[in-house]
């Protein structure tokens, strides 16, 4: 199976390494403005990995030419933060071939729809199958250009859905050898809602703004930054997310329960669960507030959830309060920026019931 | 001038000491459930003070009998947190005499109206003149029962208004020798709005919830807890307060400017101003979140401001976000508790213009 990986960050390198380790020929793409890892992978002819996966795996091509990377690819992984999905999709536009499968990994929120829109594919087009995952299936860091350390490859709690959802199992079968723990979500709303980052990152950050800014993040984000009161805020955000899921006919696993399933945590609670999580040991706070914990997880994640809640008729006062406060702290108006909403995805006209059918 | 002081906490002891130091006979009251300072003042026959005021001053009576304390008093100071005003007023009910002046110190929010309601006095009754101050005119701590240390007696930026406001100057003349820095506010909305605690305490606390809970407040609340991002939240709350004032025809001095006038701060900015404030040096964070910075300054202060904003037609999204988040953190619903609102004060039926007239 020929694999194309778009995105040369930590996640992209992990997917590329893992696919190669399973015996697949891999090609790696990134834009010219991100040359560092591409160059390192090129020089070494592949990716070095430490941690629970380790060794060296070859990458057949690492470069900035999207046509070379897509040529003959059976699976195309678009791996990066929420704001990377659209540029990747636009780069693929008119180069995708019938029968190719695209996996936006992770979805963030509606990533598969964002990709289809950016690539000029109709929402229900099936010539190219586009899917998304609920999370990146790794805890991974780049420690040098082209060299990664994988701390965790998720043992469960990773969901995948294609749009339309009837092709989900076809995609799962195709990735089975690399991702046996991936399971089918009902539709892309479930994968989007199951993304835990908007639930945990902004709440914990807000409750520690003073310390993050004063120490430049020199403390353990989960083990020290989470206390019972902080946990209550995380839980309140999570409850609103779960309520949105209920209204949309989608089951959302509470974040700490998912954390246990994924192998990060050993106790499914909102406070002590994070404080004692082996998978979060040593994870420092962000060095500055201007970071993806706000810019992605509020700017995309919570703004999307608030919007989805409105469309589904679910009140989200706590999510709205978090957005308001993060906006003040960052001198931005995340709601007005509207980076990812049901409207920008082209889904704002549907009722909950209609969504169920249009995505199925 | 005979002085009655209701409230034997740090503020009450400071007022009693200062009035006695100016040569006035002073009597001190508190409820039986607060016996500690009353007993100490009784045993010593007065109050010991260190700091910028110092020495010993006699207190003629310290006890739990409200009639003895009110008998012949020319000025009655009700000194305590917001929740003390109503019990003090109810204790005074039917014991107040024509010509007596009551000063609720500080107002917190509408303290003079709360007192009149509790004491059974009509809003525009003038037989007993009831006034309120914008703040306690001291930075003071009790370091032992009956012994206080006064760090600062405010050099300015302390406002007083009576209800109706036409008697404000009469009251100011009566307290002039003890409080020469006190000046007239337009009405009790101005004294209430000028209370800075709801602007600074909840915002700084929220941005430091993790650290407060983890260290039990073992850091400097202002000098370490305030950073540029924290300052932006304080400023956003302050802007909404100032906007409410504008709509009600009342000028509100921005908090850092007031801090400079009062002698706490040397720089009128929302971040560095607090970090460098000589008057805030050594002020530790609260030992637990269940503290007046939320319970009084959100539960009374911000809930009142949000309500006043609604009545005046001023949007307060940031104040509302702070209330929502503090409620989640404290497992309480401060809005539903409605400890002090325009409705509980009996003022909810008036337009901004009518308020101006009914309070004047």
Image (cartoon, coloured by chain):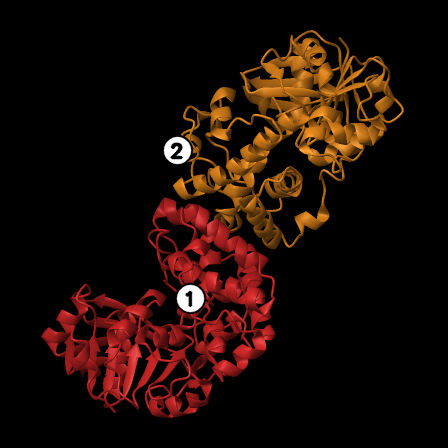
Chain colours: A orange, B red
Chain for disc number 1? B
Spatial CA distance of label 1 from label 2 is 40 Å
Q: In this view, does A79 lie to the left or right of B169?
A: right
Closer to viewer: mark 1 or mark 2: 1
Chain for disc number 2? A
Q: Name the residue under label 1.
A: B344
Residue drawn where x is 46% and y is 30% of the image: A281
Q: What is the x, y in percent for residue A347? A: 75, 34
Residue drawn where x is 19% and y is 77% of the image: B66
Q: In this view, does A149 lie to the left or right of B20?
A: right
Q: How crowded is mark 2: few (under 14 residues within 10 Å), some or many (20 or more)?
A: some
* Displayed quadrant of residue B140: bottom left
**Label number found at residue A272:** 2
Q: What is the x, y in percent for residue B273? A: 51, 67
Residue drawn where x is 12% and y is 79% of the image: B45
Confirm whether residue B223 shows in the render: no
**Label number found at residue A287:** none
Q: Relative to B329, say whether B314 is above or below.
A: below
Q: What is the x, y in percent for residue B105? A: 35, 76
């Amino acid at each position: 199976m020929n694999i194309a990986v778009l995105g040369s960050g930590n996640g992209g390198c992990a997917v590329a390494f893992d696919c190669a380790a399973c015996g697949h020929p891999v090609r790696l793409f990134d834009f010219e403005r991100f040359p560092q890892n591409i160059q390192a992978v090129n020089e070494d002819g592949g990716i070095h990995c430490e941690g629970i996966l380790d060794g060296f795996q070859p990458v057949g091509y690492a470069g900035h030419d999207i046509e070379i990377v897509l040529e003959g690819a059976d699976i195309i992984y678009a791996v990066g933060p929420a704001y990377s999905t659209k540029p990747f999709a636009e780069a693929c536009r008119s180069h995708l071939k019938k029968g190719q499968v695209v996996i936006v990994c992770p979805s963030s929120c509606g990533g598969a729809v964002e990709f289809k829109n950016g690539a000029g594919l109709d929402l229900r087009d099936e010539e190219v199958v586009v899917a998304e995952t609920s999370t990146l299936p790794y805890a991974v860091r780049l420690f040098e250009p082209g060299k990664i350390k994988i701390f965790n490859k998720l043992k469960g709690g990773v969901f995948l859905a294609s749009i339309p959802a009837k092709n989900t199992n076809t995609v799962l079968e195709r990735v089975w050898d690399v991702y046996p723990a991936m399971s089918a979500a009902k539709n892309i709303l479930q994968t989007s809602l199951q993304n835990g980052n908007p639930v945990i990152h902004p709440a914990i950050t807000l409750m520690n703004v003073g310390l993050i800014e004063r120490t430049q993040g020199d403390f353990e984000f989960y083990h020290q930054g989470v206390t019972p009161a902080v946990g209550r805020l995380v839980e309140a955000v999570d409850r609103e997310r779960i309520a949105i899921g209920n209204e949309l006919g989608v089951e959302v696993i509470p974040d700490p329960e998912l954390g246990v399933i994924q192998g990060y945590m050993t106790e499914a609670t909102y406070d002590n669960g994070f404080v004692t999580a082996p998978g979060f040991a040593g994870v420092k706070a962000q060095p500055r507030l201007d970071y993806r914990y706000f810019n992605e997880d509020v700017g995309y994640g919570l703004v999307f959830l608030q919007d989805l809640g409105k469309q589904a008729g679910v009140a989200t006062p706590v999510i709205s309060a978090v957005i308001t406060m993060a906006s003040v702290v960052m001198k931005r108006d995340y709601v007005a920026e509207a980076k990812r909403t049901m409207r920008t995805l082209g889904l704002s006209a549907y009722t909950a019931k209609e969504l169920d059918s249009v995505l199925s």
